[in-house]
Amino acid sequence: MALEDPGPREHDRIARRAGLAAVPVPVDAEGLDVNNLRRTRAQAVLVTPAHQCPTGVALSPSRRRQLIDWADDVDGVILEDDYDAEFRYDRQPVGSLQGIDPERVVALGSVSNTLAPAVRIGWVLAPSRFVPGIIQEKHLAGGGAPGLDQEALALLIESGHFDRHLRRMCEVYRKRRDVLAEEVGATLGADRLQGLAAGCHALLRLPPDVSEDAVVTSARSLSVGVSGLGRYRLTPTTGDPALVLGFGNLTDHQLRRGVRRLADAVRQAAESPPNTGTRPA
């Protein structure tokens, strides 16, 4: 199974537990590098096309077409992890790959980001040939999601409250994103953030001579929790240093205070010994 690199944490471990070889495929400004994917022996790939985790880029239209063509050519399957596509700030939500080729794409979704992770309800929209196997695996893994929770979610959707909740939260997150961007621009410099068009996290590019690990450690000592991009890499190679910043559950005051402390952490790290590279945790 091919996986985005960098990509969501622990997907490689999940693939290996299923008996698959996890094959890293680089991500660039247009998303997954499909030409690189073609050089692998993979027949399945897991992607986060609407808001790539963690870089925040959207899979470009040309790459989407290339990815569908790849699946046709190798008789492959695309697993589409649609984890936060509902929260889009620059335009309407990006269309699903599953809508382009429902016979090649398995769409995965949940209410973990839209409602709360504790609800523990997700779904799989799969080609019919996979449905019996998915049902069997889900049954063996735990028997299904709680019935009362499913009824409550169905009522929330049918009544229109779920859509209203999404619209309200999208505006809330947009404002928090704007606070984050404003404060980063004021303290760390303009054009440091990427992935701001959607979701509840952004990528902060660090100066090339600054160590991710040093910044993360220094920020933690200042009561600010951030993750280095190295934690999301599948290959232990060095790359441009960056931090993943979550903003969805923070107030404006917390965001401003946190970014100012993070700026202090970056300055402290810049004064420390030269960067020797980062490795995934």
Image (tube, grey):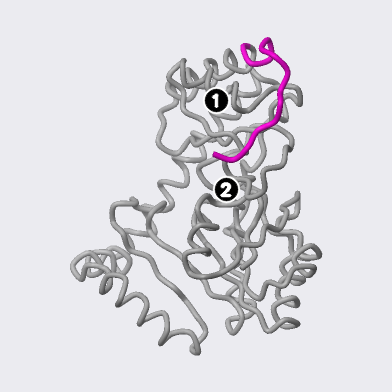
Q: Give the Cα separation between the discs numbered 1 and 2.
A: 24 Å
* Residue 81 relative to residue 112: left or right: right
* Residue 264 relative to residue 207: left or right: left
* The one of 210 and 255 positioned closer to us in this rendering: 210
Q: Position of residue 27 (x, y in %)?
A: 72, 52
* Residue 260 relative to residue 187: left or right: left
Q: Residue at horizontal 29%, vertical 52%?
A: 118
The stretch of residues the image draws in magenta is 268-281
Q: Where is 235 relative to 94, above or below? A: above
Q: Which residue is mark 2?
A: 198
| Residue 276 falls inside the magenta stretch | yes
Tag 1: residue type? Answer: Val
Q: Secondary structure under badge 1?
A: helix
Q: Position of residue 104 (x, y in %)?
A: 61, 80
* The one of 167 and 142 positioned closer to us in this rendering: 142
Q: Where is 66 relative to 256, above or below? A: below
* 1 or 2: tag closer to the N-terminus: 2
Tag 2: residue type? Answer: Ala
Q: Which mark is residue 278?
A: none
* The one of 189 and 278 positioned closer to us in this rendering: 278
Q: Residue at horizontal 75%, vertical 50%?
A: 28
Q: Which numbered mark, 1 or 2, is in the foreground of this view?
A: 1
Q: Which residue is mark 1?
A: 216
Q: Quadrant of residue 75?
A: bottom right
